[in-house]
Image (tube, rainbow, N blue to C red):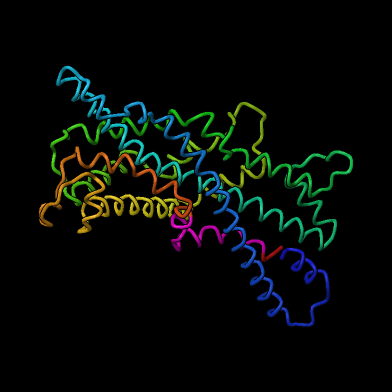
């Protein structure tokens, strides 16, 4: 695709300028679709590692087998403490999965778009003449490569280092903030559900409201700030001479845009809807099969509208599965806000 664009750029074009521009825009849009597909594949491939990381940090598995642990308790106080632990860790794992998948996918997607956009610019600049390629490399701050290394090799080396930020092994979140992030979630979950005991009855609306209020507590001033705090390295201190690499600087400029906040909020709203749909399917729908999955005996439809928290928690324990399903990534990126934001990264290429 890119080579075809370069070939047409370098050869005389008998069409009018308007036709040529329209054709090039169409080709770039097609290339953007391929980039979107590559980003989705990359994010989906990272899900197993991210799931393993999150479940380990949350530590819910330490309570298994839960029923046996409860039965082994000699005092009622010990049983209540176990149930409180289950409540804390189950909801932490559920919302932690939501935020981790959304944030990880967003970071990786932005990175891939930036690197791919630079690669296409590099190819087109090279086809247009060496001067433009030199200007591009000067902007990159690239140092001369090793013998036999082309300018494109140097450019892609910078890109590979940039992508390490979102790596599932040795990435920034994993090595610096996964534990701190989960602790932040635990604190807010504890505050939100402190007044609910195992016999507290919840209908669909009240459960959704608890989760909505929890989101407000977790996100604070904005989801974008939360994302940058835990998933993106901070800028170097002002008193140092350290500079931010171009790829990272461009990414942070994009994240300062209002459109980025809108896009991220749209993805979180989509993820929140998936969580609410999970509870609806497993607890509040009229599907008797769904009722059997939570161990409920047959009851009248009218009585299915409310459940004690003790029955909600087993469903909550499995909520993480909806986000670590490979199809979840495409669903999280299905809104128009997401499409519009990532299209912006390619818009400037029309003038290259």
**Main SS category, magenta section:** helix
Q: Quadrant of the C terminus?
A: bottom right
Q: Position of residue 319 (x, y in %)?
A: 34, 44
Q: Residue shown at 69%/65% (left/top)?
A: 351
Q: Position of residue 270 (x, y in %)?
A: 38, 55
Is residue 180 within the magenta segment?
no
Instruction: Residue at the far bottom: name it.
Output: 15
Instruction: Residue at the far top: name it.
Output: 74
Residue 233: quarter of image: top right
Q: Position of residue 108 (x, y in %)?
A: 56, 46
> 259 and 91: which one is in front?
91
Left or right: residue 334 compared with residue 314 = right
Q: Residue shown at 79%/78% (left/top)?
A: 13
Q: Position of residue 307 (x, y in %)?
A: 16, 45
Q: Is 319 located above or below residue 131 in the figure? A: above
> 203 and 314: which one is in front?
314
Instruction: Residue at the far right: name it.
Output: 147
Q: Residue shown at 23%/28% (left/top)?
A: 84
Left or right: residue 203 compared with residue 251 = left
Left or right: residue 155 compared with residue 308 = right
Left or right: residue 342 compared with residue 79 = right
Is residue 334 within the magenta segment?
yes
> 228 and 98: which one is in front?
98
Which residue range is magenta in the image?
330-349
Q: Is 177 located above or below residue 303 in the figure? A: above
Q: Is 348 located above or below residue 211 in the figure? A: below
Q: Quadrant of the N terminus?
A: bottom right
């Amino acid at each position: 695709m890119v080579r075809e664009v370069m070939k047409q750029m370098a050869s005389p074009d008998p069409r009018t300028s308007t036709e040529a521009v329209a054709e090039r825009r169409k080709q770039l849009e097609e290339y953007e679709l391929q980039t979107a597909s590559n980003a989705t594949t990359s994010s989906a491939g990272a899900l197993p590692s991210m799931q393993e990381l999150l479940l380990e940090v949350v530590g819910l598995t330490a309570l298994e087998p839960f029923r046996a642990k409860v039965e082994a308790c000699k005092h009622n106080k010990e049983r209540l403490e176990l149930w409180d632990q289950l409540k804390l860790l189950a909801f932490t794992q559920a919302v932690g999965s939501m935020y981790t998948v959304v944030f990880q996918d967003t970071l990786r997607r932005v990175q891939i778009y930036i690197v791919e956009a630079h690669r296409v610019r590099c190819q087109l600049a090279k086809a247009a003449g060496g001067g433009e390629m030199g200007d591009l490399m000067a902007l990159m701050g690239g140092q001369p490569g090793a013998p036999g290394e082309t300018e494109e090799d140097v450019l892609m080396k910078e890109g590979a280092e940039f992508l390490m930020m979102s790596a599932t092994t040795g990435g920034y979140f994993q090595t610096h903030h996964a534990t701190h992030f989960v602790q932040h979630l635990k604190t807010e979950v504890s505050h939100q559900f402190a007044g609910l005991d195992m016999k507290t009855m919840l209908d669909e609306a009240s459960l959704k409201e608890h989760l909505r209020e929890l989101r407000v507590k977790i996100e604070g001033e904005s989801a974008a700030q939360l994302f940058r705090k835990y998933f993106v390295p901070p800028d170097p201190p002002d008193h140092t001479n350290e500079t931010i690499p171009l790829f990272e600087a461009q990414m942070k400029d994009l994240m300062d845009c209002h459109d980025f906040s809108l896009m991220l909020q749209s993805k979180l709203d989509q993820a929140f809807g998936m969580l609410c749909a999970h509870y609806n399917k497993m607890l509040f729908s009229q599907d008797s099969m769904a009722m059997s999955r939570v161990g409920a005996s047959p009851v009248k439809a009218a009585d299915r509208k409310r459940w004690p928290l003790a029955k909600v928690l087993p469903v909550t324990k499995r909520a993480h599965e909806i986000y670590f399903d490979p199809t979840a990534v495409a669903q999280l990126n299905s809104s128009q806000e997401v499409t519009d934001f990532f299209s912006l990264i390619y818009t400037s290429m029309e003038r290259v």
